[in-house]
C-alpha cells in the first residue's frame, strides 16, 4: 500500500464498489478517497479484505498476481520507508534489525493474527524469510507499474541483499557466507559468467 496509488475495492462497509485512492496511511488506518473526493477510513484488515486489484488510475485497471496488501503494514509500522523521499540506507537497515530482533508477542498489531504469526519468533529463519519475501515482493510488484518507482525498487533490492549478508548464518549456517554458497555452486555447475558448462 502506497499513498497516491489507486485500488479496486469490493464495496462494503457503506462504500460502493469502485476505484479508490489511498490518501493517508498509518499502522492502524487506511484513508481512501473515491473520484469525487469522498473519504473513507478503513483498518488495514478491512482494506486487505476489500482490495481486489491494483489500478493505474481512476479509469484503468491492471490485474496481476495476488499482492499481499498486509505485508507493507508491518514494515511501515516500524517506520521503514524507501524511495526518493525515503530513509537513508543506515536508517532502513537499523529498522530491519529492530524488526528481526523484536519478540513475536511485541510486534505491532498490524493485520490479522495469522499475518503476524507468519513473522515467527525474533532472530529466526522464519522471520528473515518473511522480511525477505516482503522486500522482494514489493520490488517485483513495483516493476509492474506504468511508471516504476526506480529508487524504491533499488532500495528494496539493496535491503534484501544486505539482509542476506547480515543474517547469512540464519540462511546458510554458521560461518557460511553468500560468497561461499556462490563459489560452491560455481564449482559444482561451472562458472556461468565464463560461459562454461558443468
Image (spheres, grey):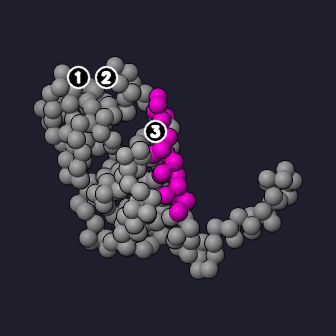
Q: Residue at x 38, y 21 (%)?
A: 60
Q: Residue at x 53, y 63 (%)?
A: 162
The answer to which image quadrant residue 126 occupies is bottom left
Report which residue position mark 3 lands on: 149
Query: Answer yes or no: do the residues labelled 1 and 2 have beta carbons within 8 Å?
Result: yes
Q: What's the CA distance linking mark 1 and mark 2?
A: 7 Å
Q: Is residue 56 above or below residue 86?
A: above
The answer to which image quadrant residue 31 occupies is top left
Image location of residue 94, percent across then percent down: 40, 66
Give the camera-side residue of 139 and 149: 149
* Residue farthest bottom in this picture: 174
Q: What's the CA distance linking mark 2 and mark 3?
A: 19 Å
Q: Residue at x 37, y 29 (%)?
A: 55
Res. 35 mark: 1
The residue carrying pointer 1 sits among few (fewer than 14), some (14 to 19) or many (20 or more) residues within 10 Å by Cα, namely: few
Residue 185 seen in this snapshot: yes
Q: Is residue 144 above or below residue 108?
A: above
* Residue farthest left in this picture: 14
Report which residue position mark 2 lands on: 58
Give the camera-side residue of 167 and 147: 147
Amino acid at each position: 500500500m502506497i499513498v497516491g496509488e489507486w485500488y479496486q475495492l469490493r464495496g462494503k462497509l457503506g462504500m460502493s464498489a469502485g476505484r479508490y485512492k489511498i490518501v493517508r496511511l498509518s499502522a492502524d488506518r487506511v484513508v481512501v478517497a473515491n473520484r469525487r473526493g469522498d473519504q473513507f477510513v478503513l483498518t488495514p484488515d478491512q482494506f486487505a479484505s476489500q482490495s481486489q486489484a491494483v489500478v493505474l488510475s481512476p479509469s484503468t485497471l491492471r490485474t496481476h498476481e495476488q499482492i499481499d496488501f498486509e505485508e507493507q503494514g508491518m514494515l511501515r509500522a516500524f517506520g521503514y520507508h524507501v524511495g526518493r523521499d525515503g530513509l537513508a540506507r543506515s536508517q532502513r537497515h537499523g529498522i530491519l534489525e529492530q524488526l528481526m530482533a523484536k519478540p513475536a508477542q511485541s510486534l505491532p498489531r498490524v493485520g490479522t493474527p495469522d499475518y503476524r504469526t507468519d513473522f515467527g519468533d525474533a532472530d529466526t529463519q522464519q522471520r528473515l524469510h518473511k522480511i525477505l519475501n516482503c522486500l522482494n515482493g514489493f520490488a517485483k510488484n513495483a516493476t509492474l507499474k506504468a511508471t516504476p518507482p526506480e529508487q524504491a525498487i533499488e532500495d528494496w533490492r539493496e535491503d534484501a541483499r544486505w539482509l542476506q549478508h547480515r543474517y547469512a548464518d540464519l540462511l546458510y549456517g554458521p560461518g557460511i557466507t553468500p560468497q561461499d554458497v556462490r563459489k560452491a555452486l560455481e564449482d559444482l555447475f561451472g562458472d556461468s559468467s565464463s560461459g562454461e558448462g558443468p
